[in-house]
Structure formats: C-alpha cells, structure tokens
Image: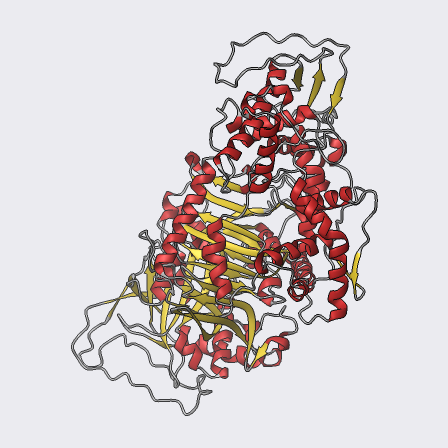
Amino acid sequence: MGTEIRTESVRQQEKAILDKENPKSAIEMPLNKIPVNKCICGCNAPMLYAKRDCKIPYSNARENFTVILNTFFKHNPIPALVSEEQPIDLYDFFHIIQKVKKECGRVSWRRVSKSLGVFKSSSEFRRPLRKYYKRFLRNFEDWLKDKGPVSIGCIDTSLVIIILKEFLPNFINQKPAHESVSTEQTSPVSQENSNSEIADLIDYLISEIEAGKVIMKKRKIEEDPPETKKPISKDPIFIIYRKNKEEKKPTIQKVKKVKPPKEKKVEKVPKDLPKLDIVNPMTDEYRSKDPALMGYRTDFRKGYLPIEMQEEHEKMEKVQAERDSKAHFIRKKQSAVNIKRSCGVTYVKPTESKQLGVRHEFPPLPPLAFQVGTVDRIIPQDEKTQYFNLAKDIIKEIFESNKLIRTTIQLGFSEEDLKKYIIGEKPDGEEVFIKGPKELWRMLGKDNFVVLHFNADERTLFTPLGPGQFGNCKIGFLVKKGLCGTRSVKRCLCLPEKDDDPLNMYATQIRLELYITKSLWKNALSTTRKLLCAFIAEFEGYIQKLLPEWNDLRENIFKTKIIPEGETIYKALDQCSCPKDMTPTPPKSFWEYKSNIRPGNLDKCPSCLKTLYEQVKTYSKGIEGIFESKSSPNWFYLINTRDSFSYDLKVKKSYIQYKDRRITKKVYMFHKDDLPSNYKDWDKFLEGDYVRTGVVAFKNCFTHEELKDLEQEALNTEANFLKGQFINSTAQPSFGAGGKIKRTKFFFGTRYMWTSHQLAEKQSKIAAGVRIDVSETPAWMRTKIENPLVEAGIIEKGFINSIAMNIYHDGKEGLAQHFDDAVRFKQPIYTVKLDSDARLSFGSQFYGYLNGAFCIPCPRGAVCMMEEFSYAANSAKHCVRPCDLAGRSITIIMRQIHPFIMEEARRYDEEIDLPTWFSTLSLDDNSVPYSKQKEMQAKIMMKEDGAPKSSY
C-alpha cells in the first residue's frame, strides 16, 4: 500500500493512449469511462496516482518491493541470490544497481560489489551477480518502468474514499487545470490529465456518498475515561454500511465548481443491511496481547556491551538506595557514583561562561564548586587515627586559646551568592570576632552565610586574621530551612526515635564546609591535604556536639522572649596608629603545629594599651525571627548535600583544520589516582597519568553567522509545528502557568515512548518503544549541522538516523538525570548547543541537582560527544540542572537507533499502527483523533492496573 510518483515518460504514454481513444480531453470523458488501473495483486481495487506527502508514512518500501517482485514471478518463483556462500538482499541489490546506472550510465559490477560491502571483490564474487541480474532482474526492471509500482490497492473502495478525503483535499472541488501537487518537472498537459483524472474520480466517489449509497455510522467516544472498571468495547470505532440499491451511472457533464448543496436529512439505515466490520486493534483484548505471541521481538538487552554497563549501574543504584533509604527518604533518587558525601574541602572556580554572541541579555552561568577532599576519599584507613589526633590538637589550639577569630555574616545568601563571595566577587557582610564557636548559634539564621576567616601557608596552618583581612581558608556555615527525614535528624542530635514519629519534618539545615583557594590545594603536599580533610571532619563532630545545646537555647528564647547574655563576641573599634609587631616564630617543621603558638590578633595595643575590640553581650543577628514566630523554632541539623562536583577534570586539547577555521577538540579526563569507585576497566582508557571520562567537546565548529542561522531555523521549526505543519506526535510541548510554553521536545524520523500513558500497555515493548509515526527530519538539520560535522570528520557518514531537539524557553526547567538508553541507541551520542551557554552534569544525586561527580561546559555552538563503551555514557547518568541554564537554550541530539529496532518499528507501523489509524479515520469534524483515543484508553488501563513500569 502506498502512492506513486509517475515518471514523465509514463505520463506521456498514458496521454497518448487517452488521446488515441478519445480526441477530446480527458475532462470531457464520461466519469464512468475514465480509465482506472487495477491493483496488480488481483484484488480489483482502483489504482490512484498522486504525489506522496512525505509527512504521511503510508508504507514500507522494502515490503512493497517484495510484493511486486513476488507478483511478477508468481508463476516461476525467483531463487535466492547467493555469491560465494554470502546471501544478498534483493532489495539492496536491485536499488544499488539503479543507483550505479544513474551515476555511471552503465552497471559497474565493481562499484556494485563495493556498495554491498565487499571492497576487494573477486571475479568469482561478481560473476553470479551479473548472471543473476541478466537472467531475472533485467526483465523485471523493464516491466517496473513500464507498469510502475503499486499505489493505493488492497483496500476496500469505501476506505479509499475516506483516505482521499483526508489527505487529498486540494483535489476536491478544484478546477482540472489547477497546478499539480507533484514537485517534479512535468509538462502542463500531463499534469492536467493526471490531476483531472484524480479530481473526477474523487468527485464521482463522493457523489455516491452524498447520494446516500455509502453511509458511515460512527460510534461516539467519551472525552474522559469512564469511572467504572468495565473493559472498553471491542466493537470497531465505526462501521460502514452499504445500501442494497443498484448504482446509477452519472450523466456526462463537465466538472464545474458548484455551491455546496443544502443539508439534507440522512435516511435511516435499515436494520437488515449487511455491515462491513473494519478490524480495530484499539480494543483492550488486542492491545493487551503479548508482543512475543504476535511475532515481535521483545528482548533487546543482549549483544551490546553498553547495555550491560548501564544495567550494572542500575543494580548498584538500587542496592545503594535500599541501603540509604532508612537514613534519608530522598536518597532513593541518588546516583550510584559511590562517593560518600560529608563536609570536606572545596574550592570555587570562576565561571567559564561568556555568553558570546547570544541575542539576549543572558547573564553568565554561576561559578562552579568542587569538593576535592573528604576523609574517606583522601586518607587511607590506616592513617586516619594519626591525622584525626593532629586535627584535634589544631581545633583545641584555635578555639580554646581565647584567640579572636574574624567572622562575617552575609544575610540572604543564595548558593550562587556564596560561590561569588568565595572568589571575591561579592563584598563582605557584617564583621564580628569570636573566641570560639559556642556562640555561633546567635548568627545562624535562615539564608545566612557565616564565615570564619583564616590564612594558610607553608609554615603555618589556620592563622586567625585581623579586621578587614582576607585569607585563603574559610570555614563556612550556610543555613537554609528545609524538609528532612525525622529519624535522620534525631540520629544527628542523639535523640531517641519513636515508632509514631512522622516521616519528615522541617529543620534548620546547616551545611558546613572548608573553602580554600584552588592554588592552595594544587600546591599543597599530600600530608597537608590529608590534614585539611581530617580537620574539617573533626570540626564537624565538634559542632554536632553543640547542636542539642543550641536547640535548647533557641527554644528557651521562644518561650521567655529573653536573649541570654554572652561573653565571646566582639566588634572591632577604630584602630590606633601605633606599630604592631605580630610576626610569629616560624616552626621548625610542618609537624610542630601542636607545640607552635599560633599568631593572633591582640586585645590591646602593646604601645598605648588602647582597647581594640568591644564586647557585644546580646548579639542577635540570626535569632530575631524567633520572637515573631508562632511555633517553636526548627531544630538545627547538619546536612551532607552539596551543590558541588567531586572531580575537576583535566582537559587535553588538540586541533582539527576544517575549511577556513580551526576546530578545538577537548578530551575530558580523570587523574588515575582519583577515580570514581564504579569506574571499571579504567586501564583500557589510560593515557599517561590520566583516564578518559568518555566525553569529547568540539569548539568553533560553526561561525557566529552560521549559529544565528541555525537558531532562527530552530525557532521557525517550532513555529511551523504550532501552525500544524508537522505530525502531532513529532513534538511534545510542556506548558507552565498562563499557558506559556516552557519546553518543547521534538522527535524527527523516529521517536521513543517515555511518558506514563505511553508505557501503560504491553505493546510499548515492541521495537523497544521506538515509533516512526513522526515527521521527517527537516532538511536544515542535515545540510547545516550533520553534513558539516561529517565533512570535518567528527561524525561518521551515514551514522545518524534519529535527530531530536529540545528547546528550553525560560531556562527554569532542566532535564532530569538519565542514560541515553543503549537498548535503543548505538553510541556515540552527539549534541549541539545553540542560543546560550549551558552545562551537562554527570553522576548527580538528589533529583539530579546536588553532589555531582563532574560537569562538562557546553558553550553556545559547542558539539559534545559521549564515546561508545565509555564511563560517561554508561556508568554515570547525565542531566541539565536548572541553575546551568541562564535563559532560552536549544539542544540538538543526534543518535543512531539500532537498525534491527528500526526494522521492528517499521513492521509495527505497517502491520498495526497504520491500519489502526486508517480504521479510525472519519469525515466527522467532532471525531476523536487516533492519538487521543490511545491516550484515553491508556488512562483507563493505568487506573485498573496501576502506574506502569518502564522496561527501557
């Protein structure tokens, strides 16, 4: 079943036959004598020729070819083609010959062999091909050029009318001389004959319908699924009745435009008329059939290594979720990149985002934080006791020696504000000095960021600073209000747990972290790094012991409305002009911290004895809200989530010369001594001291003018979809408040099922959920993106068979963590970033926003590739965090769906989806579309069976 574009020679032959039979034009012939060819299969259905609409997937070319070939050789079956014991597909063989003849003007058997995949063919291989072609396919080729392939056949005539009414509207009520829908260069006479033939036949058949000789009775479908659990009716969507009347031949008259007749009452259909049921696969019974019993393959999880790698990751993720679910309810969502998170050592890098060339005022993306050191990651088990003892001595010396410590309080700080402050892009807040952390509870209010300032060098670690001084070490407390697991909070506070405790509770979350400069970490010795990690871990335990006392003090203030006085908080006064010698005696070695007297600021000037600091007994910057609160203050609770990444990757650069530009190739790598625990067989990807992550980025692939053109093409594509110029399933827009589009997800060429109602039936497993009921890939994606990347050697020629496009309109909706499923897709995977800068995050936890493993910058115009069999593609899920989108962003994803899955998808489309779609066609304007019917019935299945579980 399909349509045909007839060649010019065939049209001229038909015109000659018509002119010979009747010297008058075909328009003036009686409608009942218009020559209509019949289907070659013998079903006697009419053959209707027209330009095929490329958006409508009528049929599969390979299946059509097989049917025609078998029809031609039905009296003498054609044997299989085998050369040197290698079977050859006749469809590929025949079409390769046609292509070679078109290019060379003759059949070059060496080129035919090369196209079949045999680059060094022998005469023994080519001889059977040549002999087979001359004996069988040459006559078939001549016959095919003369007769042409099957068009609309093997369908009931009444259904042909419906299809024509639906898809050839420009032929209805149209003058015969109008332009042909074909885009080929044909003569005006042949176009007129072809169009007039179709127009006359359509008018004739429709006149039969209007005369009441063919009546369709359509069953009503409820807009909303019924509340009851009764099965959906197994009757067809509509039934076609035929009246038992002899058909009258139409009178001979010219086709003229006539005003539509007034509506007439339709005669009632007699009960005794025969009915023709169209098979309807929309029934519950059909849709719940096991795909394997229908002859479809359902197991696609074998024979491809990335599938096994992704499954292993999923198993690790499941085990970790079960182990950690008791500690915190949200951990069921975390990644299997097994890095135990707690407080640690972090440095912040300035943003790499420049937002170059964007057409909007988008701000650069926020800076990036990297938690590069924790106890479990840096210190071996047998050395932990030694370093923890050193850390205890340092804490005792700093916080129990009455030395004043510079402290600043930043009010209303967000995560982005924190990072900018650490790298010096935001000014200091209010400054106070403390003699120990016991009074910190007065400063820890909602959205406050409290910082203790120190300096470190090769001689001394954690030197307290004076007024206005900045160091390279900061102990930070970020305070937020949030929902936490009740049992997790109680265990943190050493409180007894009860069986009737609620699952969750609101708490004042405190995130403790040691922030240092990148240069300090990169230049530090291994011993210094270990000591820094041990110090912040021991300090976390020190603070945790203070939490119950702090919570009791806050509760007492809420009840009494009185702030207790303290003695350890000071403010700096105006400094005198006397010189001060605060140079410490340098230690003899790094390990003399416990005996070395640390330098500190002075309470009084040694020269004039003027007081330098003023005591503040009732400091209340973080507890003022307790007085106005109507409920008890939330408990303080230390959290272990971080908006940071564990690995600051090494970038290896090289260059590719393409046309007039130089493309920068960036390969992202781990250090071999610092790898994720779930990195398997890393030695296979080792290059010197570094191991490939599996992500490669290409910069400068497109000029600024080319990017502007691509961005406009993308927006035009979306506008055309909203105008209805694409098949509905091609795009899936997401809407926010007020009906504003937030994200539009496009599938071209193929799509895959992923929503809950799509996965609610067994047939979603057919072809791994891949479907071809979408529009073809726009030409600009092939010519302006894929082809240049193929020419530059970045993408293999012919590799891409599926292109998707995501348009993020406001930058507030990211993309959840996921794999590009290896069951469906063959790797590598390519993405192109347009319109603004973004980032791709890997191995994130807690809904994909926190505790990430690493991230890849994706500036505007960048091309990102995830390599086959790589860690990034198969062992760490990736996502796009909302904080890594500054505004509208466009991503184009280019992939290859496995060829055997594509074949299953085509077969499903021909045997099930397309016939079902035909069975639901209707002339009624109020009819329910096929896709809507499927969605409605899927909702009923979901109500009865519960939420579906995706297998892919």
Task: Specify the quadrant of the image occupied by residue 659.
Answer: bottom left
Viewer-proximal residue among 214 and 897: 214
| Front residue of this view, candidates 941 and 556 | 941
Q: List x then y, in percent, for residue 655.
A: 44, 74
> Which quadrant does the N terminus fall into?
top right
Q: Nearer the viewer, residue 346 or 751?
A: 751
Q: Give the percent coordinates (x, y) of residue 211.
A: 62, 12
In the displayed structure, 934 sits above or below 483; it is: above
- Picture quadrant of residue 58: top right
Question: Does residue 434 lie above or below 558 as drawn?
Answer: below
Quadrant of residue 111 within the rendered picture: bottom right
Q: Residue at x 66, y 57 (%)?
A: 97
Residue 305 to residue 500: above or below: below
Colour basis: secondary structure
Q: Residue furthest right?
A: 76
Q: Point out the residue furthest to the bottom here.
A: 588
Answer above or below: position of 391 versus 418.
below
| Residue occupying the far left of the picture | 577
Relative horizontal placement of residue 255, taking residue 430 as reference (left or right): right
Q: Quick check: 751 left or right of 600?
A: right
Q: How many marks?
A: 0
Query: Is residue 640 in view?
Result: no
Which residue is located at x 50 percent, y 80 percent?
390
Residue 679 image point, x, y percent: 62, 70
On the image, the x and y values in percent for residue 306 come to 66, 63
Answer whether residue 391 is visible to the viewer in this image. yes
